[in-house]
Amino acid sequence: MSPRDIPTVSRIPGVFEKLKAAGRKALIPFITAGDPDKASTVPIMHALVTAGADIIELGVPFSDPMADGPTIQRSSERALKHGTSLRDCLDFVREFRSRDQATPVVLMGYANPIEAMGYDTFAAAAADAGVDGVLVVDYPPEESVELTTKLRAAGIDSIFLLSPTSLDQRMEEVAHLASGYVYYVSLKGVTGAAHLDLAEIARKIPQIRARVNLPIGVGFGIRDGATARAVSGISDAVVIGSRLVQEIEAAPPGQAAAKVGSLVAEIRRAMDAQA
Amino acid sequence: MQMTDLPDRKGHFGPYGGIFVAETLMYALDELRDNYERLRQDPAFVAEFEYELKHYVGRPSPVYFAKRLTEQCGGAQIWLKREDLNHTGAHKINNTMGQALVARHMGKKRIIAETGAGQHGVASATVAARFGMECVVYMGSEDIQRQAPNVYRMKLLGASVVPVESGSKTLKDALNEAMRDWVTNVEGTFYIIGTVAGPHPYPMMVRDFNSVVGRELLTQMPEAAGRFPDAILACVGGGSNAMGAFYPFIPHQEVRLIGVEAGGHGLHTGKHAATLCAGKPGVLHGNRTYLMQDENGQIMETHSISAGLDYPGVGPEHAWLKDTGRAEYVAVTDEEALEAFHALCRVEGIIPALESSHAVAQAMKMARTMSKDKVLLVNLSGRGDKDMNTVAHHSGLTL
Ligand SMILES: Cc1ncc(COP(=O)(O)O)c(C=O)c1O
């Protein structure tokens, strides 16, 4: 049995259906949990929703973030300095859920903290905390059948990355396991890099659509409202990470939620103006 | 399946190895695997590699009976495989030569590498100069301090050395940074990983290129000592010199294979890099293997007097050799390695690398408890010129 045969029960498909009916695109902000400190994370999550976020990607800090650029590396280092663990991240989601039962939360991170916790424990704890999706950057489809199956049985979607260099066969492998949405990495390189090729994205998305029957989010390299609007014109969702993490890094103490909230609100307005 | 037939097509050694990288790197790894699978079967490529090993690297490296060291220990015979006599002074060039040839066949003009002790960086810079390729070496800023002579050697050879300031500023962070470079510049760049770690096909490819060490031993030991050794000892950082010496001997069950890890200040202190002795399985740098990690799965900072062993992971094939019991892994402390370093200098006139000194220390320990007809073979992976500052510092001197 493929994990895809287990019906999804997360909050993610409902969000995309509603947006589609309204002719709008999803805005998915990414923040690193525990950055700048543990107490800020849940307030920042609520501020993101107030500002117009549809889904939140919560980064689980890792000591060796191989696929991240300097901005997210530094945010992980700040979070780890306060000892932010995978268990803390699950606690943040549980606390967030006490006030918000509607907004999907996707945990995004690296394999080893999950390996250390164990798949069964993680799947059960994540479901219990109210997690909707999991994206493990360094688990390609061929290494993640077991975890994906266990998550799906616990009602959690597995989000996978696709890149400009993904061939048709790889898209099909992803299609076999993925649910919720797929995340198209819009450039070669690490998070936070500055160049983004809209024409290339426009070429690639129909190829993905032909093989993967899920909403497509685009991320890596989106830094402002204008780009977000352009990307949302050709995809189903826009993911913004490094730019927000930068805002959190630069915010005076106690003002991270307010700063990042106003930036997300501005991006939301730009995206909706097009509709 | 024979153990020597591993890894499988997806890079697994039992539960270890595999490919654990972001989607953005999959294409590059597929391309590398396909090219390497083809080249390793190609007699012309093999001949080209052997020619370079003979005429440029200076192979075969001799085996040498350390008679006076043996007498001093008073037990089993200690023999040395002299990888320290290779061009650039360590086993690392066996691998960089092989990978540089693969890079040439793939039409890549830019080489990147990570380095800890600087030996792999020097070996990469050397082959890049030899073939007229651009070379960028990532090195933790801590290691740049510890290994200044090698930094200068790389620069003389025309490489640029990029200091890495993230994380613990050592080898593991240099590897992260090299991966980030690769994912960004994937088209024209070839990443030469310096040990039997990383995603498939690296653990296999690096092992294959270093296996020339073990293959030479298969004929040299019967010629020189009249038989195979009772045990082969090699230090294990990522494990490339050990894997190269062990691999051809895996089917020869009568030969014990002993990997010697960096015990640092002692396993009980937590300040060490003895991953197989004290770590737990997990995923780092593209493969599943034993790791030094905390209870939350964060990678721990390691300690060793030798920068080349100061790594929190280990090659996945070693993890499998450990679990299956085919190889044994032990740890030797900084102090024991230093003692062996000085012994080899004084008694044999050979200045070994601090990494290799760990294996010498274990051989000296074992020899004392074994009879004189037993034979221990130490893979002397490198020479110690690069370690002058470190050793002097430990003796209270500044050069
Ligand atoms: C002389 C020498 N021996 C051993 C090592 C450790 O690497 P490995 O375990 O891959 O042989 C190094 C690494 O820099 C080295 O320079």
Image (cartoon, coloured by chain):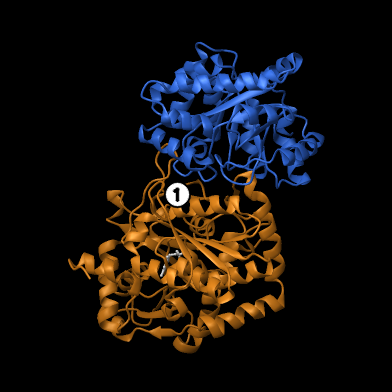
Numbered disc 1: secondary structure: strand
- Residue A65 appears in the picture as rendered: yes
Residue at 50% across, 73% down: B126
Q: Position of residue B12 (x, y in %)?
A: 61, 54
Residue at 58% across, 80% down: B52
- Most distant residue in the top direction: A99
- The picture quadrant for ligand 1 comes to bottom left
Foreground residue, A168 or B198? A168
The relative height of residue B45 versus residue B325 in the rendered view (above or below) is below
Q: Position of residue B342 (x, y in %)?
A: 25, 74
User: In the rendered image of this protein, which colour is used for chain B?
Assistant: orange
The relative height of residue B204 versus residue A214 in the rendered view (above or below) is below
Q: Is residue A169 left or right of residue A120?
A: right
Q: Is residue B119 left or right of residue A183?
A: left
- Residue B229 appears in the picture as rendered: no
Q: Which residue is mark 1?
A: B291
